[in-house]
Image: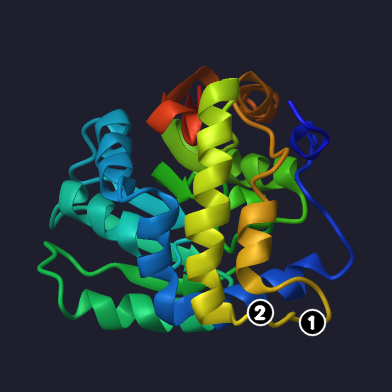
Amino acid sequence: MGNEDKIKPNGTQFKGKETYVKDVFTEISDYYDEMNEIMSMHMIQGWHEYMMKLAGPIAGRRCLDVGTGTGEIAFQVAQHAGPEGSVTGLDITPKMLDLARAKMKERSLPKLVEFVEGDALKMPYAADTFDLVTSGYMLRNVTDLQQAIDEMYRVLRPGGRAVVAEMATPDNRVVRYFYKWYIRNRVQKMGRKYDHGEKLDGKMPAYDWLVTSIQGFPHGKVMAAKFEKAGFVHVEVHSKTFGAVNIYVGDKP
């Protein structure tokens, strides 16, 4: 494992990160879905379907998608929660939420998703509110990783479940070699088409951040321990696409 891949317990942090990340996602919102397909090697929909399988039966349940972005996971949850359930998508970036609302008009959902602007580190909900919390590719972008997980635990009701997906650098050396080649020669080159290599807030270009934030980000057993520290039980790690993404599942007792 190279120096750039050494585990950073709280992810990559720096002064002004919250503002920078919000500016990044405002900047890339129009092509976020397209680049997610490229970053996931066109496997992202399969990952989301697997998340729904791990969520279990949620018909009629109250659900929250944290860091909802353009709403893709929230739409999946809504299909499974059905007309008697409810789904809220929370995100800190207004432009992403505007896109999610626009996309929803083209979806045939059993019930509309409520999209709300809010901070994953201080969610505007009482404790013990939701039956299911989902999140995808958001944890790398927060300024306090443990607090974000603690908040998911707090807003879940006893017996509720969290299903959280996050990118990772694969542990296997051979897989990691090809993964880095793909990131460098496909993802970053495509990203340049959109961010033009222009720095945001005096820092790195948008897609440099999205790639850099994966390097050294806690995953596997290290991340599972953070869910357990928050209070989750029956924590599981499901590694997909040779470790490029991990899906964490935990229950609130």
Q: Is residue 86 positioned above or below 219 on the image?
A: below
Which image quarter is the N terminus in? top right
Q: Percent from the top left, x then y, of residue 95?
A: 49, 83
Q: Quadrant of residue 88?
A: bottom left
Q: Is residue 249 positioned above or below 35 on the image?
A: above
Residue name at image x 79 percent, y 82 percent: 201
| In this rendering, position of residue 100 left or right of residue 202 | left
Query: Which of the two labelled residues, at mark 1 and mark 2, occupies the earlier sequence position?
Result: 2
Residue name at image x 17 percent, y 53 percent: 79
Q: Which residue is mark 1?
A: 201
Q: Percent from the top left, x then y, of residue 48?
A: 31, 45
Q: The residue under label 2 is which amino acid type?
A: Asp
Q: Quadrant of residue 126?
A: bottom right
Give whichever of 78, 197 is nearer the camera.
197
Q: Secondary structure at mark 1?
A: loop
Q: Is residue 99 positioned above or below 138 on the image?
A: below
The residue carrying pointer 1 sits among few (fewer than 14), some (14 to 19) or many (20 or more) residues within 10 Å by Cα, namely some
Q: Which residue is mark 2?
A: 23
Q: Quadrant of residue 86?
A: bottom left
| In this rendering, position of residue 184 left or right of residue 251 | right
Q: The residue under label 1 is which amino acid type?
A: Asp
| In this rendering, position of residue 131 left or right of residue 138 | left
Query: Mark 1–mark 2 contact, CB under 8 Å?
Result: yes
Question: How many angstroms separate mark 1 from mark 2 (CA)?
Answer: 8 Å
